[in-house]
Amino acid sequence: MYSMTTSSQETALPPTAHGGHPQRWLILGVICLAQLTVLLDNTILNVAIPSLTREMDASTADIQWMMNAYSLVQSGLLLTAGNSADRYGRKLMLMSGLAVFGVGSLAAGLSQSPAQLIAARAGMGVGGALLMTTTLAVVVQIFDDRERVKAIALWSTVSSLGFAAGPLIGGVMLNHFWWGAIFLINIPVAVLGLVAVAALVPESRHKAGDRPDLLGAVLSTIGMTAVVYAIITGPEHGWTSGQVLVSALIGVLVLGLFVLWELRTEHPMLDMHFFRNQKFIGAVAGAILVAFGMTGSLFLLTQHLQFVLGYEPLDAGLRTAPLALTVVALNFTGIGAKFVLKVGTPGAIALGMTLVSAGLAAIALLGGHGYGGMLLGLVVMGAGVALSMPAMANAIMSAIPPEKAGVGAGVNGTLAEFGNGLGVAVLGAVLNSRFASLVAVSAASLPAALAAAGSPEEKARISDAFASGLETSQLVGAVAVLAGGLVAAGLLRRAERAESA
């Protein structure tokens, strides 16, 4: 394991005889609780959309900004938040994130207008960025090489748990309370987390004497926000619309300036030489494609369950839960981490991505006429995610020096955001293209096309075309995930051989 000292270079509490912090598993529980709160907020708002539309008289644009303000701010600040954690202290930034997230939740729960709620959600995004980066950075600091894979597996499992539990918790809350309760429930969790972090988590920071890279922070925030905005709004406004193209162009240009600046400045927030490391590049490619396949497929699945198989929204959400529950079961029992340690990171990524690909293919080929084939695909996908996600997060973090753990966590979170957006964008575009090629309709969605249909036969033809489009897009996703997984595993295997040589 790396050395943990009390010098100005890197400060932390001393390790135990086993090489980790004596209360590391209890600290991990606290960290996972904080992480779960942030992740729940990514999905819990979905079930409140009808209530917000009715009680706040919110327009469609208002609802979209309520959803996007949180993810835009969070994704734009991930690298800056990770760099701040390394510089000023991971414990300090973790507590700051909990405090900001709690205050933002209070403001959201008490909002009286759409504008107030949008502003509160943006504030929660700031807290979310701090939490997403510092939680993983602290895990790297308190666990040694022997236990870190298992710890990261448990940390990453919280993502799947948050996805599965968000709609369910939101539905239960809305059945008994008003919509603001879905935000106010975060406050006691944030307070509990603050107390626990203050009492248990050791402080660690690196090179307090380095000058802050303020220009790099500004450029990365603007560039990431612009690119993610283009990805989020592309399906709605059209990929060739001026709004999307201008946003994408600004994002690419600003990120290009960020790269040039980071190569020239003496104290970069993100060392571009990391990208010469084959291990890092392999992990980066894999992380993007796992997020691509998982998020893109779930975007398609919700439409498949509702529009093709006829389930209500809540029922559809519950029927996607087996994917997340499989991830939780394999990683909480330690099976995923044991497998990674047994076959190595490249082997775990290759098998995991193959399973994700096979699950997508099973959903496409077997799930068209009933839930049984889809259930099989979801479970297989879950097993693949349980193997590949922790292996890739560990590969990214181990490819970056421990003193840059916060930046490493920021890179990991940023890649997940890119993969999520690309999955929805690319697979959604394949679906729309295939659908449009099979039936000549001017409507922008399946419900609108069905409403405009003149006869039962035409409705059946439109539904079949949509199902065919779903199948095609899921198979495209399966091929992309399989190819990317094998390439990532190959790069990692090659890097490991070079290191051992």
Image (cartoon, rainbow, N blue to C red):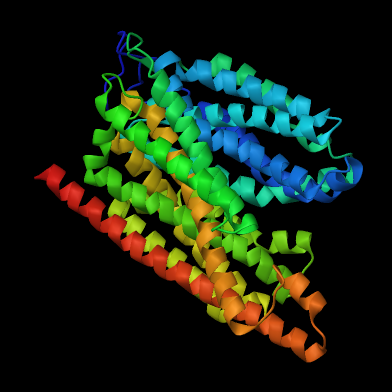
Q: Residue drawn 34% across and 26% down? A: 404
On the image, the x and y values in percent for residue 156 come to 50, 43
Quadrant position of the N terminus in the picture: top left
Left or right of 60? Residue 38 is left
Q: Quadrant of residue 425?
A: bottom right
Residue occupying the far bottom of the picture: 457
| Whether residue 18 is visible | no
Left or right of 194? Residue 283 is left
Quadrant position of the C terminus in the picture: top left
On the image, the x and y values in percent for residue 168 come to 75, 50
Q: Residue drawn 28% across and 34% down? A: 272
Where 362 sits versus 104, above or below? below
On the image, the x and y values in percent for residue 88 come to 44, 14
Where 215 sits versus 304, above or below? above
Comparing 316 with 75, the one in front is 75
Left or right of 179? Residue 488 is left
Q: How many marks?
A: 0
| Whether residue 52 is visible | yes
Comparing 481 with 15, the one in front is 481
Where 278 sits versus 399, above or below? below
Q: Residue drawn 47% across and 51% down? A: 419
Q: Residue drawn 54% across and 31% down? A: 129
Residue occupying the far front of the picture: 242
Comparing 270 with 156, the one in front is 270
Residue occupying the far left of the picture: 501
On the image, the x and y values in percent for residue 366 come to 57, 80
